[in-house]
Amino acid sequence: MKVYNLACPLEHHFEGWFASEADATQQQENGLLTCPICDSHEIVRLPSAPRIAKSSSREIAPVPAVEVTQESGNSMVLSGTEHANLQAQVQATVMKAMRDLMKKTEDVGHDFAEEARKIHYREAPERSIRGHATADETAELREEGIEVVSLPIFPALKDTLQ
Ligand SMILES: [Zn+2]
């Protein structure tokens, strides 16, 4: 089986399959070849490229590159850098809140449980205090109905507290 690239005068290119080269020549000379598009009988044979090269060139046809940017579409992308910035922002907000809280509270240090109890039973002036308490002390205070809040202390703030 022979495959030839054929063309008509109007530059329509198509393939013709023949039993042999002689068959192709005979059909061409007898005007049996027709253009599938314009029906022209003046068909010429083009220099045929090896089919294997043709199929391989089809395989490496360039795929249009799609450029994806963070701005396109509705999907939000949180990059590593942005995530780090977000963490820093949250930490900064919490730190500021903690600093504000410290300005408004009196540091009673390790006397916290005792002082909180005094305030609760009106043995000491009512005020906001902060300080240190063990888990047991905190549990006891809560059992007595004294509302205490545990705060996470950031390493950077520990220095400020002491
Ligand atoms: Zn044609």
Image: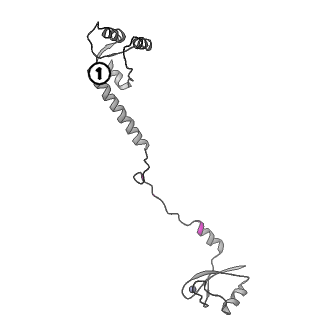
Outermost top residue: 123
Q: Which residues are magenta?
A: 58-75
Of the 4 image quadrants, the one containing the C terminus is top left
Give the total of numbered labels.
Answer: 1
Amino acid type assigned to the residue bearing label 1 in the image: Met
Residue at 43%, 42% (x, y): give it. 80
Picture coordinates of residue 1, whole percent (x, y):
73, 79
Mark 1 secondary-structure assignment: helix
Picture coordinates of residue 25, whole percent (x, y):
69, 89
**Within-10-Å neighbours for mark 1: few <14, some 14–19, many 20+:** some
- Residue 35, by quadrant, is bottom right
- In the rendered view, would you say 97 is above or below 1? above
Query: Is the CB atom of the residue marked by disc 1 within 8 angstroms of ligand 1's nearest atom?
Result: no
Ligand 1 appears in which quadrant? bottom right
Residue at 55%, 88% (x, y): give it. 9
Q: Nearer the viewer, residue 38 or 82?
A: 38
Task: Left or right? Give the position of 72 relative to 106.
Answer: right
- Name the residue tied to disc 1: 102
- Residue 26, by quadrant, is bottom right
- Residue 147, by quadrant, is top left
- In the rendered view, would you say 151 is above or below 72? above
- 126 part of magenta stretch: no
What is the magenta segment's predominant secondary structure? loop
- In the rendered view, would you say 58 is above or below 1? above
